[in-house]
Image (cartoon, rainbow, N blue to C red):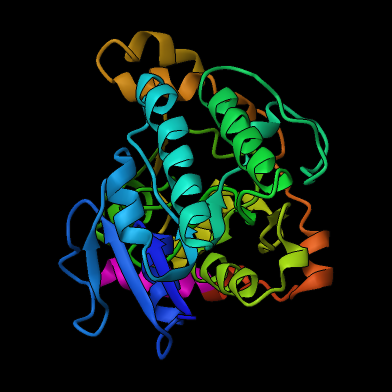
Amino acid sequence: MTKEILVIGYGPVGKATVARLEGRAVRVAQRHQPMDLPASVPFTRCDVLDAASVLEAANGASQIVLAIGFSYDRATWRTHWPKAMENVLAAAEAVNARVVFVDNLYMYGPQTAPLREDMALQDYGAKPAVRAAITRRWMEAHKSGRVKVAALRAPDFYGPGVTQSHLGGLAFGNLAKGKRALMIINPDQPHAFAYVPDIARGVISLLNAPDGDFGQAWHIPSAPMQTAREILTMGAKMLGRRLSLTAIPMGLFPVLGILMPMLNEMREMHFQWDRPYEVNATKFAKRFWADATPLDEGLAETVQSFAG
């Protein structure tokens, strides 16, 4: 039987995962071929919203890494995520492939304690409720014996070349250009940030794991949490600059959201930024590894990528 690994989605995590799979049979699938895909990595066009397309892409794969994202819009999430998840589960079942799902932490909703994998799913708001719903879908698919699935959950991430993140283009990208960093979050609450290469390393850990480690979620280890302001201050120093930062107060979101729809989408996620946001990764650390990349090392790589 082939040992080919199909990576659906070539965003930051998909790209980092493919890089770590060098030397193994790996193929990338998404709607459009990435311009920076290595010539040695085969590509298959795939629309995750089309069941036949996903099944065709899955043929020949023994494992599937689902590392996709959709536009940050609640209406899109409500329609696209359930359909994409069911299409991937059906295709994996048809070809007898395991699935590693690169997930986030929205499904826990507002919490005051460090997030754990055994916390109940919360149907809170629009996007968190969607994540809870698709979690139930893959858990039931695994429990029923249809397909083996494991979820790797990560908080907000950062890393070299990662532009679409709170620490991305508008933050470190602006600082590297000598501009003010812009944040649409509270920069003064302690918050966990995962380093993208660590997330990719976690994906590989699950790909290499036995079936007994599937049917459950795992939290990726990350460096001890700090505030975004503290992190940006460290990065600015690495760039030889002092931090210059503009943060949009959440109280202005309803007004500014008229001109910036993204702010309306962020409002329901305020619970991630109005309190310390800590992630407990003890379970993963005991089973696999605990040596997350230190923040200063990850920032050095990230800042260098933006500085060119």
Residue at left offset 51%, top offset 69%? 200
Residue at left offset 81%, top offset 37%? 119
Residue 266 on image: x %, y %: 46, 25
Q: Quadrant of residue 114?
A: top right
Depth check: give the residue in front, 195 or 140.
140
Depth check: give the residue in front, 274 or 217.
217
Depth check: give the residue in front, 151 or 105.
151
**Residue segment shown in magenta:** 298-308
* 118 to 255, vertically: above or below: below
- Could one spot residue 33 in this view of the protein? yes
* 4 to 153, vertically: above or below: below
Query: Magenta includes 303?
Result: yes
Relative horizontal placement of residue 170, taking residue 89 as reference (left or right): left
Residue 194 on image: x %, y %: 58, 58
Relative horizontal placement of residue 164, taking residue 238 as reference (left or right): left
Residue 1 on image: x %, y %: 49, 81
Residue at left offset 29%, top offset 45%? 52
Residue 153 on image: x %, y %: 62, 51
